[in-house]
Image (spheres, rainbow, N blue to C red):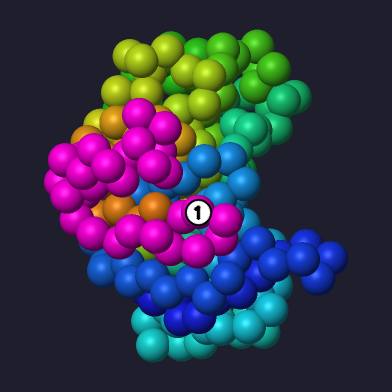
Amino acid sequence: MHLDGLTAGYGGAPVLRGVDVRVPAGTILALLGANGAGKTTLLRTVSGLMPAASGRIVFDGVDLAGVSVEDRARAGLAQVPEGRSVVAELTVDENLRLGGLQRFRGRRLTVAVDGVYEMFEPLARRRRAAGHQLSGGERQMLALGRAIIAEPRVLLLDEPSLGLAPRVVAQIMAVLRTLRDERGLTVLLAEQNVTSALAVADHGVVLNLGEVVADRPAEGLRTDSALRHAYLGF
């Protein structure tokens, strides 16, 4: 996937300003920057929830201009927005089955659900609990499980560590690493937890006021103290 000169915003006010990003297949790209940098807007524009004002989003050689959210999902894009979106009245098992219905039925769906439980053991223990009964960490695991159960090719993940205990963050990042290594999943990971994001990412892009100010391998961002102090706050 690559983004060429991507511009997007709200009510005519630009948030993204000519963003160019390359995301090789089977890699994790960390999108970094302060609040208001444009990370969420970028993910929403890629998924189709927001229109691009100009520029291109190219996936598998196809320009996604005019392609609906539903068709982008069918092509293999899945988004987990900030906020741990799950169906509060449904059980963990029902939430997962709902996420897998677009791809699987019957026995294959059950196998896919069991695969999520293997990755997130706390969900297996809570499979009959309703969404509203889960902890924040369990809800985040469930939201991620709902997205990956249909085996997307690209996962758009917005602030998955927000408000979570370090051990839960570590578990989520470990699952992302496994999905990349074993399934070849491509991940766009928007995060303010820079340390956790760069520990799992192959590459990082730093946004500031809607513009790319750094684009380099994750190791280079981890060791550039001047850049971290200027744009990432540590």
Q: Position of residue 213 (x, y in %)?
A: 39, 60
Is 60 placed above or below 97 here? below
The three-letter code of the residue at mark 1 reads Asn
Q: Is residue 59 left or right of residue 129?
A: left
Q: Position of residue 185 (x, y in %)?
A: 30, 56
Residue at image coords 65%, 62%: 15
Is 6 placed above or below 111 here? below
Q: Is residue 141 left or right of residue 48?
A: left
How many C-alpha atoms fall within 10 Å of the one at disc 1: few (<14), some, or many (≥20)? many
User: In this picture, which residue range is highlighted in magenta?
Assistant: 207-234
Seen from the viewer's position, the closer of residues 196 and 187 is: 196
Q: Quadrant of residue 17?
A: bottom right
Seen from the viewer's position, the closer of residues 186 and 195 is: 195
Task: Find out whether residue 45 is within the magenta segment.
Answer: no
Q: Position of residue 183 (x, y in %)?
A: 24, 54
Q: Is residue 135 left or right of residue 86?
A: left
Q: Quadrant of the N terminus?
A: bottom left
Residue 110: in sight, yes or no? no
Residue at image mark 1: 208
Q: Position of residue 68 (x, y in %)?
A: 67, 75
Residue 77: in sight, yes or no? yes
Single out the residue that lies furthest toward the right.
11
